[in-house]
Amino acid sequence: MTKPVLILVEPQLVENIGMTARAMMNCGLEELRIVDPRDPWPLHDELQQRMDAASSGADAVLKSAKIFETVPAALADLNYVYATTARSRDMTSRTMTPRAAIPDMIGRIKAEHKVGVMFGRERTGLVNDHIVLANARITIPLNPEFSSLNLAQAVLLIGYEWYQAQDVTPDSRIHTGSSRPATREEYLNFFGRLESELETAGFFVAEDMRPGMVRSLQNTLQRAEMTEQEIRTWHGVLSALISGPHRKKASP
Amino acid sequence: MTKPVLILVEPQLVENIGMTARAMMNCGLEELRIVDPRDPWPLHDELQQRMDAASSGADAVLKSAKIFETVPAALADLNYVYATTARSRDMTSRTMTPRAAIPDMIGRIKAEHKVGVMFGRERTGLVNDHIVLANARITIPLNPEFSSLNLAQAVLLIGYEWYQAQDVTPDSRIHTGSSRPATREEYLNFFGRLESELETAGFFVAEDMRPGMVRSLQNTLQRAEMTEQEIRTWHGVLSALISGPHRKKASP
């Protein structure tokens, strides 16, 4: 699937361009356009180094970045453009959250339209003359009393939503390392042995309390979603406790 | 609702602590705990200034931040702890995406459990001895070929998901500034006038094409979801075009 183009308008600090490239690469985005950066392009050596350092290795994005003199030139080939804005402004427009904008964007991309997301300069953001060149606005819902976001962080949040929309990671999973989740039989074998050893040890003082107590122990360990390896380890724990020197010492 | 506590383990750079505070405040989070920071606390003046500058005004979070010597001490009063990790490790544990972890977290908070999210030091992340002190892990799905995230950016993404879960901003809305969306009647009045003026101007060369042409014009403008103010402006545009000096000049 084609990916959205990101357009930075008049970025002032090369560090922010570098961090933008990093955030883009974190999120699998590749095409960066830069309109009228404060420092003339190509950058002289020291600025280039500062930008590269801030990008933490996202060179591929920086190397293929294209520089434009004006916003209309940077948007010329795009079919649909989103403008990111922090505040609402007195201009009629469709405004979306990032989470709603991404499915909208994906729908357009699947229809083979070329889409872009435009970010304004640090501190001031996009001016109305640039916003009006976009089809819709994206405003990130954040603490209204403290919503100022670094340029690269705004890029990261849009990119994050883009990446999540394609991502297939299960919401929640048990990572079991090199082992596998224990089977019911493995669990029940362990509980059976534990119960029998506890009986031998005189743990069940009142017989009528026993079923509830056993259920409670089972419940604890089942909630832990143990692996086959862990069950074996707990068998070892049990063997050690019933036969080890500690126990022999404790009950002379 | 109580909010999650954020715990930074062994942060190395005061700038990252400052940026973390900023990201927290962006997302309405307040309680920060710091375990064994590289620079001794309280910071000497120059480091304090660098941290404050990076926080962009999120002083409230920094001022109330608490310092701990060990991870167990920092987690002592918490009922449930999430550890953020970049890679999967050979240790069995529940791993969630941020998007799945937040509802889980909110459920626990509503049950009046105190929850925290732990972040490891820059570059290395959390070590296994710290991860095992948590109940579950959060891994942010990102480009597997370039997933290294700045500490404050990881905090921002978790905080962003937290904020979105509480936020009531409509997914998509038409921001109409000081005006209101036009009514059907206002639209139809304008179309009626436009059609009649176009007829006068001889726009409809073939009568059988007329209904389709009128529908197409209506469709364009209705899709724009105009405000009452914009309808009035377009009435003005129409008036100007039919009577202005430009037209008089163009048809001598």
Image (cartoon, coloured by chain):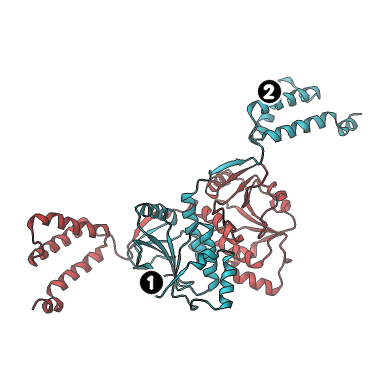
Chain colours: A cyan, B red
Helix, strand or loop under label 1: helix
Which residue is outermost to the top? A207
Q: Chain of mark 1?
A: A
Q: Is residue B189 left or right of residue B119?
A: left
Q: Quadrant of residue B110?
A: top right
Helix, strand or loop under label 2: helix
Q: Badge 2: how crowded within 10 Å, few (<14), some, or many (20+)?
A: few
Residue at image point 47% right, 68% down: A65
Q: Position of residue B179 (x, y in %)?
A: 29, 64
Question: Nearest the camera: B128 or B175?
Answer: B128
Residue at image point 15% right, 57% down: B214
Which badge, 1 or 2, comes first in the chain's sequence?
Answer: 1
| Rendered position, B101 above or below B174 | above
Whether pointer 1 and pointer 2 mark residues with C-beta atoms closer than 8 Å, the reply is no
What residue does disc 2 label? A211
| Marker count (numbered) | 2
Mark in the foreground, 1 or 2 = 1
Viewport quadrant of the C terminus of chain B: bottom left
Q: Are marks 1 and 2 on the same chain?
A: yes
Q: How far apart are the alpha carbons under marks 1 and 2? A: 74 Å
The answer, for residue B202, to whether it is visible in the render is: yes
Q: Position of residue A250 (x, y in %)?
A: 88, 32
| Residue type at tag 1 | Val
What residue does disc 1 label? A71
Question: Nearest the camera: A167 or A45?
Answer: A45
Q: Quadrant of residue B40?
A: bottom right
| Residue type at tag 2 | Pro
Q: Chain of mark 2?
A: A
Q: Badge 1: how crowded within 10 Å, few (<14), some, or many (20+)?
A: many
Q: Position of residue A165 (x, y in %)?
A: 46, 50
